[in-house]
Image (tube, rainbow, N blue to C red):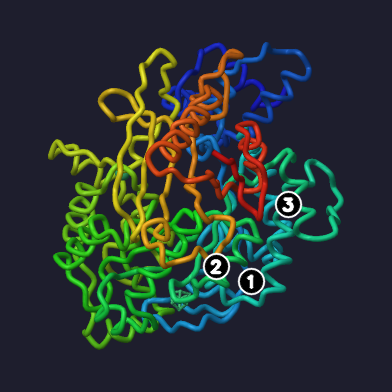
Amino acid sequence: MSVNQFIIKGLLKDKVKTLENLACAKRKYSKIYKIACPSNVRLLKAYHELLLKKRISPSKTLELVLKTRPVRSLSGVVNVSVLTKPYPCPGSCLYCPNEPGIPKSYLSGEPAVERAKKLKYDPYLQVKRRLEMLESEGHNTEKIELRIVGGTWSFYPKNYQKKFIKKCFDACNDAGKKRKADFKDLPASQKKNEKAKHRIVRLSIETRPDFIDEKEIKKLRLFGVTKVELGVQSLYDDILKINKRGHPVSSTITATRLLKDAGFKVSYQMMLNLLGASPKRDIEMFKSLFLNQAFQPDSLKIYPCALVKEAPLYQWYLDRKYQPYSAEELINAVVEIKKIVPPYTRIERVIRDISSKTIVDGPAKISNLRQIVEKKMESKGVKCQCIRCREIKSDYNPKEKIFLFRYDYPSSEGREIFLSFENKSREKIFSLLRLRVPSFYYDKSQKPFLKILENAGLIREMHTYGAVTSISGKKISAQHKGLGQKLIKKAEEICKKEFKVKKLAAISSVGAREYFRKSGFKLKDLYMVKPL
Ligand code: SF4
Ligand SMILES: [Zn+2]
């Protein structure tokens, strides 16, 4: 038996149940065997070897604990990020790093960049390797959120975009086979993915607000995109201008409305501490972001401006015309923002994954900012209400009572109805559905630019949280408990009774189409549609 196999036997004997138990036991055995702490991947491999030789009985508990970073699949979907090749961007933002051989706005040393660089930015290989890695760590890879990142997606040539997306679908369809799939074209690859082993249930791209128009949206739909991350950065025209962002706030307002009216999920990337900003103005900006109906993104990434040598802003810093906030100023600003976030928004990140060595100066060096902010909020007795902080993780108790909540708010000249299943205290969220009554429903002089959406209520997002996993053969997940179907029923009822629209249209990613078919939806013009 190998050392790792001995350790597995020890872990089973010690009845390791939690991550803390595991960390403790790993330290103990590495001392006993005089080896470096073994990785969870290696231990999981040894566990499977022993199982195969029938030297141990299966232990779902240990298996679960050995998943290296279980947090990745806790929302029931694994994230796979794919980087596009280095390509020019029409922008010349002051804070944006421009490193040769690296996609604009990214830096060598960032984990995703290093992985992509090694694979020459080949999308097929990037997806394939990532899936293999996640599987070796013990994650369920049936449902995938594919995130296409790197530069401004909308600026890449259409042919490159098409091939890129097709290769991502091919990699997911090619379950376990060595050869590359050679499906004729993108629609064929997408069709195949509807029933593939790895289904793309969400697909996002990142782009600039001024690149979003009706034509671009139609193209994004053809590609199967369901979520758009807009590089908004600031809601002040003077700050956008001085930072050479190249578009005004009005571009963000238009893009947000067009995207929401086409059923897309809208995410904003926002920056704190830009040239010309102050903590006070930053906090005011977020008040407007959450309260002004022209904005209200569904999710949010907050990136404190990272001062790096590769960006033109560095010269401003050397000339003493730019000074990063102090750590305290930044922490306080993020606390204030988190205090006012509405319950239908998800704060995905509060800091970027850049090595602190690359950052010249400033609080963007604090890589555990989220944890520091959480501690500070705890000490003040306040909680962040965002979805991410409330979505259920592995602490799911199937006996806990859950309730249906409804929250209506005007948004981008239409109306959003946020439906969710939560526990009584609303500290845990199990499932959510974003229903939209589009702006053209209220302004009859406007025709929708996508004919299929005429007279329709839109399902922009439907999601149930909880790890897709089982312990001792029992499902512990909130998924598959019919919560999603119940939310769809409720959305139908609202559309029929309150708005008297003729149909319900869900944006649905390719890999989620089967799910909607089970609820009576049919694929029509790239949306899943149900007549009411
Ligand atoms: S638009 Fe984005 S990628 Fe282009 S320069 Fe600005 S920050 Fe960089
Ligand atoms: Zn939160």
Nearer-the-camera pick, 289 or 111: 289
Nearer-the-camera pick, 21 or 301: 301
Residue 344 location, quadrant: top left
Residue in the image at 50% along x and 52% along y: 455
Question: Crowding near pointer 3: few (<14 within 10 Å), some, many (20+)?
Answer: many
Kindly identify the amino acid type of the residue bearing the numbered disc 1.
Lys
User: Circle 3 is placed at which residue position?
Assistant: 190
| Label 3 lies in ligand 1 vicinity (Cβ under 8 Å) | no
Q: Is residue 206 above or below residue 8?
A: below
Kindly identify the amino acid type of the residue bearing the numbered disc 2.
Gly
Q: Quadrant of the N terminus?
A: top right
Q: Helix, strand or loop at disc 2?
A: loop
Labels 3 and 2: the sequence-earlier one? 2
Q: Helix, strand or loop at disc 1?
A: loop
For the residues marked 3 and 2, what is the alpha-carbon distance in whole angstroms?
23 Å
Labels 3, 2: front one:
3
Q: Is residue 39 above or below residue 527?
A: above
Question: Crowding near pointer 1: few (<14 within 10 Å), some, many (20+)?
Answer: many
For the residues marked 3 and 1, what is the alpha-carbon distance in whole angstroms?
22 Å
Labels 2 and 1: the sequence-earlier one? 1
Give percent across and percent down for residue 333: 19, 57
Kindly identify the amino acid type of the residue bearing the numbered disc 3.
Gln
Q: Is residue 46 above or below residue 495?
A: above
User: Circle 2 is placed at which residue position?
Assistant: 150
Q: Quadrant of the C terminus?
A: top right
Labels 3 and 1: the sequence-earlier one? 1
Residue in the image at 20% along x and 47% along y: 339
Residue in the image at 67% along x and 63% along y: 118
Q: Which mark is residue 85?
A: 1
Question: Crowding near pointer 2: few (<14 within 10 Å), some, many (20+)?
Answer: many
**Is disc 2 in contact with disc 1, using a CB cutoff of under 8 Å?**
yes
